[in-house]
Amino acid sequence: MTDWKGYALAKPGAWPDEPWEGDLVAKVGDKIFVFLGGSGNGQVTSLGVKCGDREAADEWLLRYPDDAARMGYIGQHGWNTLAVGSRIPDDELRDAIDTSYELIVARLPKRVRDTLG
């Protein structure tokens, strides 16, 4: 079983935050790059990730209609929720975290990006 929190927080400059009670996220700079949805017992059951634009995010919905969903509020900006322990392979979930991180880092100010290594 993959340690999704550990995987996300191993990214350069990543740090945990709980901006809303009970909602754990991983940030880089001051931006969220993954929502770590849980069952309340510390186990991650879903990942909220930026998949690119809405068209790229919709590809996940077509490939995994039972395990991927458009995120509320920010879904129109290319964010999806992906189920952990589902038909989505772990390597694709890792790739989704990697992509989300890269997309968010690319939008950070250069001075912040330069500190990430």
Image: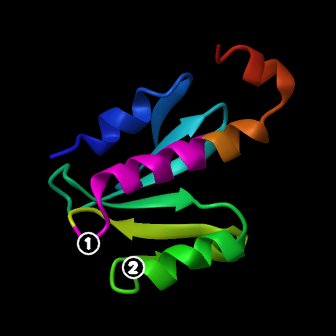
| Dot 2 amino acid type | Tyr
**Number of numbered discs visible in the structure rendering:** 2
How far is mark 1 from mark 2, CA to CA? 7 Å
- SS type, badge 2: loop
Horizontally, residue 110 falls left or right of residue 83, namely right
Q: Residue at x 58, y 48 (%)?
A: 99
Q: Looking at the picture, how far across and down is residue 96, in whole percent?
A: 49, 53
Image position of 103 with respect to 114: above or below? below
Q: Are marks 1 and 2 in contact (CB under 8 Å)?
A: yes
Q: Which residues are magenta?
A: 86-101
Q: Looking at the picture, how far across and down is residue 115, in whole percent?
A: 70, 14
Which is nearer the eye, 87 or 105? 87
Horizontally, residue 70 falls left or right of residue 66, namely right
Crowding at mark 2 (Cα within 10 Å: few <14, some 14-19, many 20+): some
Image position of 77 with respect to 64: above or below? above
Q: Residue at x 49, y 28 (%)?
A: 11
Q: Looking at the picture, how far across and down is residue 22, in whole percent?
A: 34, 55
- Which of the labelled discs sits on residue 87, or is there none? 1
Image position of 4 with respect to 38: above or below? above
| Dot 1 amino acid type | Arg
Q: Looking at the picture, how far across and down is residue 9, in whole percent?
A: 42, 31
Which badge, 1 or 2, is on the more N-terminal residue? 2
- Which of the labelled discs sits on residue 29, or is there none? none
Which is nearer the eye, 109 or 16? 109
- SS type, badge 1: loop
Which is nearer the eye, 99 or 25? 99
Secondary structure mostly taken by the magenta-highlighted segment of the chain: helix
Residue receiving disc 2: 64
Quarter of the picture containing the C terminus is top right
